[in-house]
Amino acid sequence: MPYSEVEKMEKSRGPARAATQSQRITKAAQFMLASFGFLTLVFWATYTLAQDDSAENVIKSHGISTFGELKYPADFDHWDYVNPDAPQGGTISLLGTGASGTYDSLNPFILKGEPAQGLGLMYDSLLVGSSDEPDSAYGYVAETLEYPEDRSWVIFNMRPEARFSDGEPITADDVVFSFNILMEKGHPVYKIIYKDIETVEALSPHRVKFTFRENANTRDLPSVAGGLSILAEHYYADRDFGESTIEVPVTSGGYTAKDIKPGKSISYCKNPDYWAKDLPHNRGTGNFDCYRYEYFTDRTVAFEAFKAGAFLFHEEFFSKIWATGYDFPALDKGWVIRDSIPDNRPTGTQGLWINMRKEKFADPRVREAIGMVFNFEWSNKTLFYGLYERTDSFWENSTMQAEGPLEGAELALLEPFRDQLPESIFADPPFTPAISRIDQADRKALRAAGKLLDDAGWKVVNGKRTNAQGEVLSLEILDDSPSFERIINPYVENLKRLGIDARYSMIDQAQYQQRQEDFDFDIIPGRLVMSLSPGEELATTFGTTGADSLGSSNFSGLSNPVVDALIVKIAQAESREDMETAVRALDRVLRSLHIWVPNWFKPAHNIAYWDVFGRPETKPFYARGVMDTWWMDQQKLDDLKAQGALR
């Protein structure tokens, strides 16, 4: 997902993204930075199986889907969006992201440390997803799965040939260990993600059972379980999993970390003995022998390095550079290609998150006023070269975005909560930021915001917004990168015009991370990725469950019974239509609460790359596709080297 100006997603990182070369998708981090999306499937064939001495109607399948049949049969040959005959080999090099410009850990599963980018390449899971279905996953380490119609448990039948990077077999005991160690020492968000998994037990060396908590919403739980990254129990027998380290671990995926140089680079290269290299899931994917991430502490230096061929692929997040910086000789000569490719997923909830744990932000009128003086129209013209659109929805660029008057099924869903919701939800279309004049200080917006603050009891006294207790309304926008400064400083000036004692503070990355995890801030920038098939994981971002869980992505501290109830409705939905209706209702409610200052979006990836790659004719609908489906064109590479363009 394009973040636009700065890749703030890194600031909301949580558990590792377990996406390997065949789009392994796990639910575990979809809602944190690195975000795991998780997908679920259903196969409409059943058989009777004796389970715990009683007969149950059990479904056995090669995959599971939330709302419909699987696209791919059990004997599929390859994903439709790949070139199954893609050449293999070569190294794709990219910019390593992270506000600190470095990393100090190869353990992405814990709160401690700054993990290197790309660590998900080293881990496999029981199930994987395809990139052309919104809610499906297929057996990977697990060849098949079994579950009853109520999905109260799931059994994964694991492939006996599956091996760790050191050649040791992957067993059911390793799956049990992975769950237990993540719950005991992993990132705090795992306790939220896996809260409805009651037990995990090895039934045999290659058969593992997850049993879910009674009365839990089980629709997505088999996929949550199947998305678990598998860790090697024998490797951690004499190591502390809770400590960050740059030691290369024994892992379950097809790539291994090499050339580890914190502050400079890290590479992930294919394990030539990888057990799954010939599975259909991998045909035409993972075509590069190595992925290398180059790190720079300064983005300007990084862009200059790209222009000089220091790395080969770059996604541009800065509008100014995209509009004015792509006029260098390599581009003019056709050595570098500049392109925009469509993004068909929700563009992400990007904005400035207001910490409602602070009493001064408890009144929604105060939060609305704070948001009202961010002048997007002026910023877009003056700072962004007109490249972006204003975000108003938490599910922007999707059919889950609330629009128009409240009616039909959405009205029926919210009617029981009428006495707990603002009347505006029922009377007006969903909240959308007003369009400002192309002036940094829109006087009409300032007057409207000032009235809201007056009504909330914050009057202007000696030029400062002051309440009845004599307290001055102050706020600090916290950040750890100078990249946002040109955008936030004009906004801070508008806040000061309201009489708010506002400031923009930049601190070092380690301190920022700690304060974010401890919720020790007034306002922070952040971007969270929304799943194509939302479920229980929304509780970590918007629910009471995540409000006080340190390290969660509930930056605003939102704890609202209606929101909690709607998240349950979303998780319990039995059809995609019902799910999307519930998400739109939630979007409408969230927008009315003014928990953030929405930013901007562009439904496309702005990319530039040295012309050394091949790519399939069809882009995967729900993915960028570069890492998974592109390949190195050796002839093109040799030609550029012969011309002196690359070394």
Image: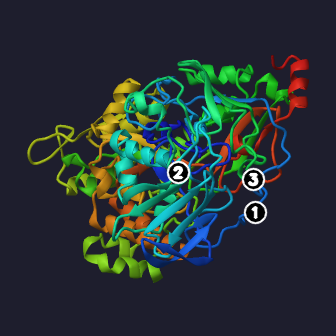
Percent coordinates x, y for residue 347 in the rendering:
56, 52
- Specify whether 34 is left or right of 520: right
Quarter of image, res 4: top right
Percent coordinates x, y for residue 399 in the rendering:
57, 67
Mark 1 lies on a secondary structure that is loop
Query: In this view of the protein, can residue 195 be seen by the observer?
Result: yes
Nearer the observer: mark 2 or 3; the answer is 2
Mark 3 lies on a secondary structure that is helix
Q: Nearer the viewer, residue 488 or 86?
A: 86
Of pointers 1 and 3, the one earlier in the residue sequence: 1
Task: State yes or no: discs 1 and 3 in contact (Cβ < 8 Å).
Answer: no
Query: In this view of the protein, can residue 374 be seen by the observer?
Result: no
Name above or below for residue 474 compared with residue 142.
above
- To which residue does mark 1 refer? 75
Residue plotted at (27% across, 66% down): 561
- To which residue does mark 3 refer? 280
User: As shown in the figure, which amino acid type bears the numbered disc 3?
Assistant: Pro
- To which residue does mark 2 refer? 205
The Cα atoms of the two marked residues, 1 and 3, are separated by 9 Å
Residue plotted at (40% across, 53% down): 193
Of pointers 1 and 2, the one earlier in the residue sequence: 1
User: As shown in the figure, which amino acid type bears the numbered disc 2?
Assistant: Pro
How crowded pointer 3 is (Cα within 10 Å; few <14, some 14-19, many 20+) is rated as: some
Percent coordinates x, y for residue 194 in the rendering:
39, 54
Of pointers 2 and 3, the one earlier in the residue sequence: 2
Q: Which of 133 and 353 is in front in this view?
A: 133
The Cα atoms of the two marked residues, 1 and 2, are separated by 25 Å
Residue plotted at (26% across, 71% down): 420
